[in-house]
């Protein structure tokens, strides 16, 4: 895929165009034109300058590249071995983890393909003939990028002359070959209209417990599974799970109720424990849009949330729902009481973490309490955009990890995390690690990182930094709950935080009160930065240093706390900051000053030493 930027200016003409792009969260300079081939999500940022030096405001566009074919499966009449009518239901199930499934088409084996139609999990199909025998139907899927899947088959036996079932409550005639709409058999509980495999001219026929539609019986939409006070609607779409269940570190006792919900809060499965510490087989139901009214339930690819005796339960592995009618082992673990952590997030970028392992780690579920207030999440080498979930590479959020989170609007917002407490060591690798903070109280940075002393070089918070070899210039003194950090390791040494109290509920405020008190409340931190420090002769405590972009924006600020020196001072890039290779300009108490060496901005997260002088240009 090639992108070409074509700037236009009807006045003085275009002087220069700047282009940058992010791929899975990393921002870098791009040529014009630029070709993209690697699979993933891209955002291009671009702006131009005319010959009169009028700058254009930065614009951006986001797109994805998907080169992977979708996969899928096909069943007929929900996996039935036999059909008694030539008109059958096909149950296609397609999966595509990138752009998503968009279309499907079908054919009788060896025949011509039908036209592509919008993807759904149910479609009507007329078998090739009205003769008894075995029939094969084939399906193929297409994703939104146009990639076609392999061909998937399903087989069914057609039997138009079944032996009649019987009971004391109902009877069915041997043949259902009567004219459409003609009643062949009825009782107090059942009624069947005769068909020749064709849709009835009237709506489906209903009894008190069953429904007949186009020649075969199925339970009506009123059927439910009951677990105490819980009632779960039954649909033809489901997966099944089983395994061990633990409550308060003990096998869950007999009578324990297990509850499964979808992302919209609908109860989609339940089970009452009959053997201590075990459950299943438990069906987890999907939505059914083929009936009126529709039955709510899970949709393909959604993550299931569990509760045990009303308490959030951790599922291992995480259950991602598909209508596969398969069985899989899922361990469920619930604490004695729910553990929560509350974070107050500020508008713009926040660097966050949590010591609570979320019950459901899917990004949209963890951030459900602020669903309308965030637009981007960055993890270590991954990213998530709520408007482009199929292309997002960040799928889950976990305790012990650090994440950049962008909050929209002008007011703070509260994020609630619910799950179980994590106290395990953090596995680190050489280089930059995006880490979370697990203790429930604030600790000095030396105490918090004592277990890796001598193994790391730098620590960055949202707006401060620490270098153990330059402690007098370091602005990051403490580590606190709710904050995320970028930690540069010399080697792969695990981090073990000191033991701390286990709180059932803690509230953290992620603010910039120190920066506001120091006089730079308008500065907006971003994930993109470089770091400056050095000497400023004759500077008194309280002297204000600013770093100015070519557009006049303040992208870095520091208030002198120790006479004649400054730093560490983060200088930010992004929409309201520097772009790659732009020169830095400095002001001291509003007066332009010289630096000891010219410096071009880069998103390198590295400390640079330079000296400033108070003499004006």
Image (cartoon, grey):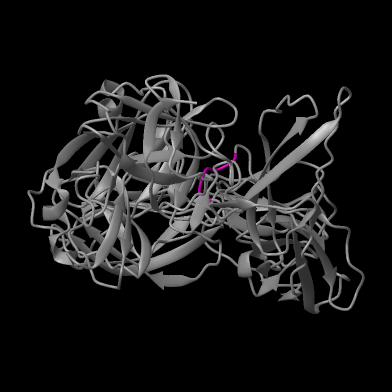
Q: Is residue 491 above or below residue 447?
A: below
Count the labels in the image: 0
Residue at 54%, 38% (x, y): give it: 578
Relative depth, front residue between 477 and 102 = 477
| 600 to the left or right of 499 | right
Residue at 17%, 50% (x, y): give it: 445
Q: Quadrant of residue 129?
A: bottom right
Q: Position of residue 394 (x, y in %)?
A: 49, 55
Residue at 87%, 22% (x, y): give it: 11
Position of the N terminus by quadrant: bottom right
Residue at 68%, 66% (x, y): give it: 70
| 235 to the left or right of 484 | right
Q: Which residues are magenta?
A: 294-298
Q: Is residue 241 above or below residue 366?
A: below
Residue 344 visible (yes or no): yes
| 210 to the left or right of 419 | right
Question: Can residue 296 be found in the magenta stretch?
Answer: yes
Give the residue at the far right of this rendering.
112
Q: Quadrant of residue 282?
A: bottom left
Question: Can residue 529 be found in the magenta stretch?
Answer: no
Q: Position of residue 510 (x, y in %)?
A: 29, 34
Relative depth, front residue between 307 and 269 = 307
């Amino acid at each position: 895929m090639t992108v070409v930027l074509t700037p236009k200016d009807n006045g003085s003409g275009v002087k220069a165009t700047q282009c940058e792009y992010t791929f899975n969260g990393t921002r870098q300079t791009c040529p014009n034109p630029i070709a993209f081939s690697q699979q993933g999500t891209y955002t291009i940022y671009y702006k131009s300058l005319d010959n009169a030096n009028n700058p254009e405001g930065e614009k951006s566009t986001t797109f994805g590249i998907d080169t992977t074919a979708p996969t899928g499966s096909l069943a007929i009449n929900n996996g039935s071995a036999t059909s008694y009518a030539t008109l059958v239901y096909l149950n296609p199930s397609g999966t595509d983890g990138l752009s998503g499934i968009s279309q499907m088409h079908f054919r009788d084996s060896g025949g011509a393909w039908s036209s592509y139609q919008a993807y759904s999990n149910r479609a009507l199909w007329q078998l090739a003939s009205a003769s008894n025998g075995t029939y094969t139907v084939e399906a193929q899927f297409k994703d939104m990028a146009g990639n076609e899947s392999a061909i998937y088959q399903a087989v069914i036996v057609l039997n138009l002359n079944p032996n009649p079932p019987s009971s004391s409550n109902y009877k069915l005639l041997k043949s259902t070959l009567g004219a459409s709409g003609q009643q062949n058999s009825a009782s107090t509980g059942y009624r069947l209209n005769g068909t020749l495999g064709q849709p009835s001219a009237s709506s489906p026929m209903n009894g008190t417990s069953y429904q007949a539609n186009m020649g075969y019986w199925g339970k009506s939409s009123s059927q439910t599974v009951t677990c105490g006070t819980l009632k779960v609607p039954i649909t033809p779409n489901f997966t099944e799970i089983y395994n061990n269940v633990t409550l308060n570190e003990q096998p869950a006792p007999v009578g324990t109720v297990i509850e499964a919900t979808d992302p919209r809060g609908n109860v989609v499965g339940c089970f009452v424990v009959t053997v201590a510490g075990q459950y299943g087989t438990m069906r987890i139901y999907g939505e059914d849009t083929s009936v009126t009214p529709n039955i709510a339930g899970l949709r393909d690819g959604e993550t299931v949330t569990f509760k045990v005796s009303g308490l959030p339960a951790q599922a291992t592995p995480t259950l991602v729902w598909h209508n596969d009618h398969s069985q899989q082992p899922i361990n469920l673990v619930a604490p004695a009481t729910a553990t929560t952590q509350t974070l107050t997030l500020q508008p713009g970028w926040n660097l966050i973490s949590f010591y609570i392992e979320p019950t459901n780690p899917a990004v949209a579920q963890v951030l459900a309490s602020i669903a309308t207030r965030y637009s981007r999440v960055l993890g270590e080498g991954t990213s998530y955009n709520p408007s482009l979930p199929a292309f997002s590479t960040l799928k889950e959020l976990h305790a012990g990890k650090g994440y950049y989170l962008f909050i929209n609007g002008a007011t703070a917002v509260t994020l609630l995390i619910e799950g179980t407490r994590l106290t395990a060591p953090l596995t680190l690798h050489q280089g930059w690690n995006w880490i979370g903070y697990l203790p429930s109280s604030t600790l000095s940075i030396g105490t918090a990182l004592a277990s890796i002393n001598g193994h790391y070089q730098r620590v960055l918070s949202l707006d401060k930094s620490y270098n153990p070899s330059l402690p007098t210039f370091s602005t990051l003194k403490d580590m606190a709950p709710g904050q995320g950090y970028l930690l540069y390791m010399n080697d792969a040494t695990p981090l073990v935080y000191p033991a701390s109290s286990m709180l059932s509920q803690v509230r953290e405020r992620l603010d910039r009160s120190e920066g506001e008190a120091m006089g730079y409340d308008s500065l907006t931190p971003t994930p993109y930065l470089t770091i400056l420090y050095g000497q400023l002769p004759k500077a008194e405590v309280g002297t204000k240093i600013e770093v100015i972009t070519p557009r006049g924006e303040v992208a870095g600020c520091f208030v002198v706390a120790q006479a004649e020196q400054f730093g560490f001072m983060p200088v930010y890039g992004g929409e309201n900051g520097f772009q790659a290779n732009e020169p830095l300009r400095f002001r001291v108490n509003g007066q332009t000053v010289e630096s000891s060496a010219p410096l071009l901005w880069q998103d390198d997260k590295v400390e640079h030493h330079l000296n400033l002088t108070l003499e004006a240009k």
